Image (cartoon, rainbow, N blue to C red):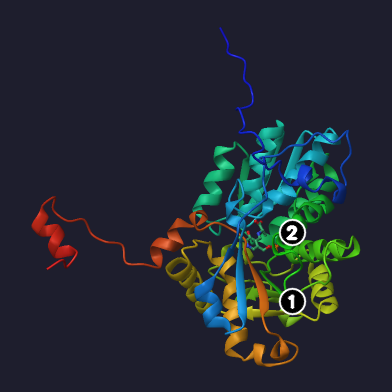
């Protein structure tokens, strides 16, 4: 006999987060006909970062938007709920993406939920273990390509022209629409837009989406201002900073190992309109920020995510906050986007620490190891 599945009893009045489409329906291109495919993404924590704030500036109030707390462990879920819901509305049976890992993890999970086929092209050997296992466990057709992300994306665009498959990379406008909800949430929690919004940049869809979110909230009079947008690329994969395509991008932050970003123009518009900038940080700076977040803030991120914090620390070392307009502010509210969870890349974590050898199962051995006397 089967037992009917029902909603768990909710405590009276306990708020229930409905996922980003329902939470921000009036700001999104959905209708009553759109089947909502959701894993209840969004509503990620905006964590105060006291240790980082002290390092940055005496008047800085730094918050970490921990996007690794989304259902598949990255910000991609915000865009994917919308992209897959709209693909379902259009009766699409298959979706396709190129990915450095997180897009494929998210696409494969949402496609599984929607009962769609999912195809992912990944740069062989350059995707973190956690992300690869996600795409595989959700039964996506994973194709490792002997090439980089940019080559994978070119192939995806070509396949989509020849076959009736929906592309769910951020060239799909619904991805950008969904990802703008990150800015909405930040404003809803802070009560207004922050002074500075700092984010890693790879294919540049996220910074484009976040800026769109702030602008729309300003137009809807939900906030009184918009932030200065600061984006950070990895030094060996910094086409926007250099102003030219990087044919062979290199960085340990594999998520942002991209030489020809699809939303290049969107990123430039965001920083131009907000008086911000796109700059580069070295792998060394990224890893230092990665360790600092883990050791001093208790927040575990993947290396690419630490690019935002690395960039912020770099600006502070360059005395950015002693200049106008920050010089005359009593407090400077800064939000760093932490795009993906540290568990995505366990190999990098283990390579960054000393892995302890086992001890004998005895008290003397344990006491000696822990230097307890
Ligand atoms: N951080 C992480 C953890 C990412 O996975 C990505 C992009 C970014 C930052 C950069 O965001 O591309 O919107 O500028 N990952 C893509 C992927 C490319 O395939 O998962 P972006």
What residue does disc 2 label?
188
According to the image, label 1 marks what residue? 240
Asked if residue 369 shows in the view, the reply is yes
Q: Quadrant of residue 53?
A: bottom right
Q: Secondary structure at mark 1?
A: helix
Q: Does mark 1's beta carbon lie closer than 8 Å to ligand 1?
A: no
Left or right: 206 as drawn, with respect to 108: right
Residue nearest the viewer, comparing 175 with 203: 175
Q: Is residue 189 above or below residue 108?
A: below
Quadrant of the snapshot with the N terminus: top right
Q: Residue 48 in the image: x percent, y percent?
A: 57, 67
Q: Earlier in the sequence, mark 2 or mark 1?
A: 2
Compare residues 282 and 216 and report the one nearer the observer: 216
| Picture layout, residue 327 above or below residue 138 | below
Q: Residues within 10 Å of mark 1 (few under 14, many from 20)?
A: many
Q: Is 178 left or right of 5, judged from the image as shown?
A: right
Across and down, in percent, residue 305 comes to 59, 65
Relative to 277, is 222 above or below? above
Q: Residue at x 46, y 66 (%)?
A: 294
- Note whether 195 is above or below 58 in the view shown: above
* Residue sitting at x 53%, y 75%: 52
- Image region (quadrant) for ligand 1: bottom right
The residues bearing labels 2 and 1 have C-alpha atoms spaced at a distance of 31 Å
**How far across and down, in percent of the image, does residue 119 sit?**
68, 42
Question: Left or right: 76 with respect to 167?
Answer: left
Is 350 in front, or is 211?
211
């Amino acid at each position: 006999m089967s037992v009917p599945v029902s909603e768990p009893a909710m405590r009276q009045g306990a708020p229930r987060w409905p996922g980003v489409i329902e939470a921000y329906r009036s700001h999104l291109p959905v209708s009553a006909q759109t089947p909502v495919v959701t894993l209840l993404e969004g509503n990620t924590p905006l964590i105060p970062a006291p240790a980082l704030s002290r390092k940055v500036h005496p008047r800085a109030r730094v918050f970490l938007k921990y996007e690794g707390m989304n259902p598949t462990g990255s910000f991609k879920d915000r865009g994917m709920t919308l992209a897959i819901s709209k693909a379902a509305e259009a009766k699409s049976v298959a979706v396709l993406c190129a990915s450095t890992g997180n897009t494929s993890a998210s696409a494969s999970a949402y496609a599984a939920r929607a009962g769609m086929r999912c195809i992912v092209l990944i740069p062989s050997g350059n995707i973190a273990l956690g992300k690869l296992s996600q795409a595989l466990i959700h039964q996506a057709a994973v194709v490792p390509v002997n090439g980089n992300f940019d080559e994978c994306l070119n192939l995806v665009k070509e396949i989509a022209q020849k076959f009736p498959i929906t592309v769910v990379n951020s060239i799909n406008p619904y991805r950008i629409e969904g990802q703008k909800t990150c800015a909405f949430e930040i404003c809803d929690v802070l009560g207004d837009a922050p002074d500075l919004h700092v984010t890693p940049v790879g294919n540049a869809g996220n910074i484009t989406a976040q800026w769109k979110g702030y602008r729309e909230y300003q137009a809807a009079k939900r906030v009184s201002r918009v932030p200065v947008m600061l984006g950070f690329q990895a030094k060996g994969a910094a086409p926007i900073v250099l102003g030219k395509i990087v044919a062979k991008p290199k960085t340990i932050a594999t998520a942002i190992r991209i030489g020809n970003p699809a939303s290049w123009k969107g990123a430039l518009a965001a920083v131009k309109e907000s008086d911000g900038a796109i700059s580069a940080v070295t792998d060394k700076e990224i890893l230092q920020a990665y360790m600092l977040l883990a050791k001093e803030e208790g927040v575990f991120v993947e290396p690419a995510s630490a690019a935002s914090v690395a960039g912020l620390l770099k600006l502070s070392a360059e005395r950015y906050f002693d200049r106008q307009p920050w010089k005359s502010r009593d407090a400077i509210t800064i939000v760093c986007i932490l795009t993906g969870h540290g568990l995505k890349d366990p190999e990098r974590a283990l390579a960054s620490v000393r892995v302890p050898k086992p001890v004998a199962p005895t008290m003397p051995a344990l006491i000696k190891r822990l230097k307890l006397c």
